[in-house]
Image (cartoon, rainbow, N blue to C red):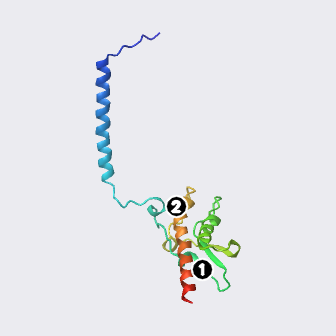
Amino acid sequence: MTAAVQHSRRAFLQCSLGALTLAVTAKGWVTTAMAAEPATKAYGADSMPGGTVDDPLVFVSIAADGAVTIVAHRAEMGTGVRTSLPMVVADEMEARWERVKVVQAPGDESRYGNQNVDGSRSMRHFLMPMRRVGAAARQMLEAAAAAR
């Protein structure tokens, strides 16, 4: 059997003080390292080559009969993104889904932004940009209707 180890109160306080000193010093190093990061660091799709594009003229077209065509710039890999991202745009436009046609974009990052499909992150990275596309398209339609 192992014998019980006896620790003195003094040894406990010395170890505790050492651990506290180490923690405070480490926090200072971490804070200094974080301060060295640029304030404009990009995250998500914005940090990827090609970034994001949220121009409605790139993704949305409306025919004279009211049919809406939405470009899916992300390829379908079994996650439903070819339907879900255009649905986000249509929802923001308040377009009827049965009047929407989805077309696949060709590979062109200069026009459509990042088109990488690995990691199942299309909805996480492109939900807000596609909402902005739909909202901007709706505002353009409202402005055109008001000008008539």
Where residue 41 sits, quadrant-wise, is: bottom left
Tell me: residue 117, above or below residue 34: below
Residue at x 33%, y 50% (from the top left corner): 34
**Quadrant of the image for the C terminus?**
bottom right
Q: Residue furthest front?
A: 146
Q: Describe residue 142's horizontal placement relative to residue 42 as left or right.
A: right
Q: Are marks 1 and 2 in contact (CB under 8 Å)?
A: no
Residue at x 52%, y 75% (from the top left corner): 136
- List the residue tagged with mark 1: 61
Separation of disc 1 and disc 2 at Cα?
A: 23 Å
- Label 2: how many Cα within 10 Å (few below 14, some 14–19, many 20+): some
Mark positioned earlier in the residue sequence (1 or 2):
1
Q: Position of residue 133 (x, y in %)?
A: 54, 72
Q: Amino acid at mark 1?
A: Ser
Q: Amino acid at mark 2?
A: His
- Label 1: how many Cα within 10 Å (few below 14, some 14–19, many 20+): some
- The residue nearer to you, when weighing 76 against 16, is 16
Q: Describe residue 10's horizontal placement relative to residue 100 as left or right.
A: left
Q: Residue furthest bottom?
A: 148
Q: Position of residue 66 (x, y in %)?
A: 66, 82
Q: Describe residue 60's horizontal placement relative to residue 97 as left or right.
A: left
- The residue nearer to you, when weighing 143 against 65, is 143
Where residue 144 sits, quadrant-wise, is: bottom right
- List the residue tagged with mark 2: 125
Tell me: residue 5, above or below residue 75: above
Residue at x 65%, y 61% (from the top left corner): 80
